[in-house]
């Protein structure tokens, strides 16, 4: 049964919320997009690039950081403008389709990143930047559809369920890659002890490179229900008129922002802690590869465990969001992330918190070393906290922002999530390059989480 919506003056939300099929189809956007973050930016392709395409892991981490920074800067500059135009034009789906196409094209081009071939590095990093821009902009407009789907008191649950569903999609995509596609170059077998499907060559890491095309195909298949069953805003004005109106509205919003102290403080906090979280996820797999010598199977298995923790974290966080409020969920998540990151920096392959332990035995069982197991536990804590942090952040914005300018505010949300997102990867890349130490680069992220937590404490819901 449809539920009558708010009748706030100037609100653009429809008078009746859509049925369950529309909501479920919207949730599957997170499922469709998550393999990009799971397979490409975190657990498979990024570590593969750093270890086998780049000259060495430290320089690979630096190059990946610079490409992430460039894409983040472009996203930061354009997100508020595009969000304002979308609010003025009324439509969301055409923008999702257009930027989703960039995700698909950029991801598929990653297949050509052959190991040991430095000539492919510039084109590969460009493809990565294009895909990153596509997925982030598509997410801006997908998020802006949330207030039209459920009543305000269920926004937290919707956001948390979306993140949890995304994590499940990431888990399944990782299982598919590790169990059937990516094999060890030494044994020629996948995690399940099988020969790779489609005759993928382990020596040339085709199982790692196939994650690009797989991500593109996955997105096309699972985003389709949203286009078919989830209603969009009606078109209000032509694109040229929407451009003028959108820019005027953005100028007005920016002028009003200093008077809205809680919104401004939250956006500043989001800017800082999102930079830290994105950097942590982007370099977590690369850091593990350099610290423990993990390859695709070990990193991917770690990713599956982390995603399982993230699924439960996001689901629980959504419930706590509706019960306790998103601000408390954000503060608790940041505290867990800060403590887990500090502990990770004190774990090395032969020590845990300054206590010497036996290093992993060469050719031993998976995660046989005590330090590896400690890293797994801490990584799962990060996964369990990262999902609720992101889900509660978009929930809090919906509670704070004017409903008739929701895409515009999600554009600002993306701006604050990206305007300094190049700084974290850039500083990690620079510090890693100067010190030749991955640990020194990652230590920087402690500052981001401490500052974000201090600012969130000042936000009033």
Image (cartoon, rainbow, N blue to C red):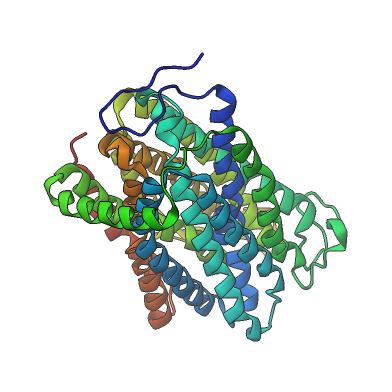
| Location of residue 82 by image quarter | bottom left
Residue 341 lies left or right of residue 358; in this view the side is left
Foreground residue, 332 or 161? Answer: 161
Q: Position of residue 366 (x, y in %)?
A: 67, 53
Residue 112 lies left or right of residue 236; in this view the side is right
Residue at 19%, 41% (x, y): give it.
459
Foreground residue, 222 or 354? Answer: 222
The answer to whether residue 155 is seen in the rendering is: yes
Is residue 204 depicted above or below 352 in this figure?
A: below
Is residue 136 depicted above or below 231 in this figure?
A: below
What residue occupies the far bottom of the structure in this picture?
119
| Location of residue 308 by image quarter | top right
* Number of numbered markers: 0
Is residue 269 depicted above or below 227 in this figure?
A: below
Foreground residue, 397 or 407? Answer: 407
Residue 426 lies left or right of residue 24; in this view the side is left
Residue at 59%, 42% (x, y): give it.
31
Residue at 40%, 17% (x, y): give it.
4
Q: Quadrant of the C terminus?
A: top left
Residue at 33%, 50% (x, y): give it.
413
Q: Position of residue 293 (x, y in %)?
A: 60, 67
| Location of residue 358 by image quarter | bottom right
Q: Position of residue 303 (x, y in %)?
A: 59, 50
The answer to whether residue 452 is seen in the rendering is: no
Q: Position of residue 180 (x, y in %)?
A: 79, 52
What residue occupies the far left of the structure in this picture?
259
């Amino acid at each position: 049964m449809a539920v009558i919506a708010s009748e706030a003056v100037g609100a653009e939300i429809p008078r009746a919320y859509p049925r369950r099929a529309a909501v479920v189809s919207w949730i599957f956007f997170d499922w469709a997009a998550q393999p990009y973050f799971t397979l490409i930016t975190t657990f498979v392709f990024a570590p593969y690039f750093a270890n086998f395409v780049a000259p060495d892991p430290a320089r690979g981490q630096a190059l990946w950081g610079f490409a992430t920074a460039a894409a983040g800067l472009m996203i930061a500059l354009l997100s508020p403008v595009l969000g304002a135009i979308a609010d003025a034009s009324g439509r969301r789906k055409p923008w999702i389709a257009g930027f989703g196409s960039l995700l698909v094209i950029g991801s598929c081009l990653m297949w050509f990143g052959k190991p040991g071939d430095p000539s492919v590095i510039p084109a590969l990093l460009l493809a990565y930047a294009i895909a990153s821009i596509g997925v982030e902009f598509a997410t801006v407009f997908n998020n802006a559809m949330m207030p039209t789907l459920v009543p305000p008191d269920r926004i937290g649950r919707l956001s948390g369920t979306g993140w949890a569903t995304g994590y499940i999609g990431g888990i399944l995509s990782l299982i598919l890659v590790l169990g059937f596609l990516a094999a060890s170059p030494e044994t020629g077998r996948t995690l399940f002890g099988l020969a790779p499907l489609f005759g993928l060559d382990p020596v040339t890491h085709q199982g790692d490179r196939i994650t690009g095309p797989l991500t593109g195909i996955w997105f096309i298949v699972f985003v389709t229900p949203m286009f078919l069953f989830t209603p969009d805003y009606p078109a209000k004005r032509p694109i040229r008129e929407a451009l003028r109106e959108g820019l005027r509205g953005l100028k007005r919003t920016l002028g009003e922002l200093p008077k809205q102290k809680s919104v401004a403080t939250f956006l500043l906090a989001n800017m800082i802690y999102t930079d830290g979280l994105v950097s942590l996820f982007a370099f977590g797999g690369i850091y593990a590869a350099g610290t423990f010598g993990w390859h695709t199977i070990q990193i991917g298995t770690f990713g599956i465990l982390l995603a399982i923790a993230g699924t439960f974290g996001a689901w629980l966080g959504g419930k706590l969001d509706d019960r306790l409020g998103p601000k408390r969920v954000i503060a608790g998540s940041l505290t867990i992330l800060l403590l887990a990151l500090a502990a990770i920096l004190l774990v090395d392959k032969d020590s845990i918190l300054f206590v010497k332990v036996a290093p992993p035995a060469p050719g031993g069982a998976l995660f046989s070393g005590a330090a590896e197991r400690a890293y797994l536990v801490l990584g799962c804590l990060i996964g369990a906290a990262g999902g609720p942090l992101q889900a509660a952040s978009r929930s809090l914005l919906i509670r704070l922002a004017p409903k008739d300018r929701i895409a515009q505010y999600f554009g600002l949300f993306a701006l604050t999530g990206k305007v300094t997102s190049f700084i974290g990867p850039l500083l990690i890349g620079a510090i890693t390059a100067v010190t030749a130490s991955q640990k020194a680069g990652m230590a920087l992220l402690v500052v981001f989480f401490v500052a974000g937590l201090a600012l969130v404490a000042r936000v009033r819901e």
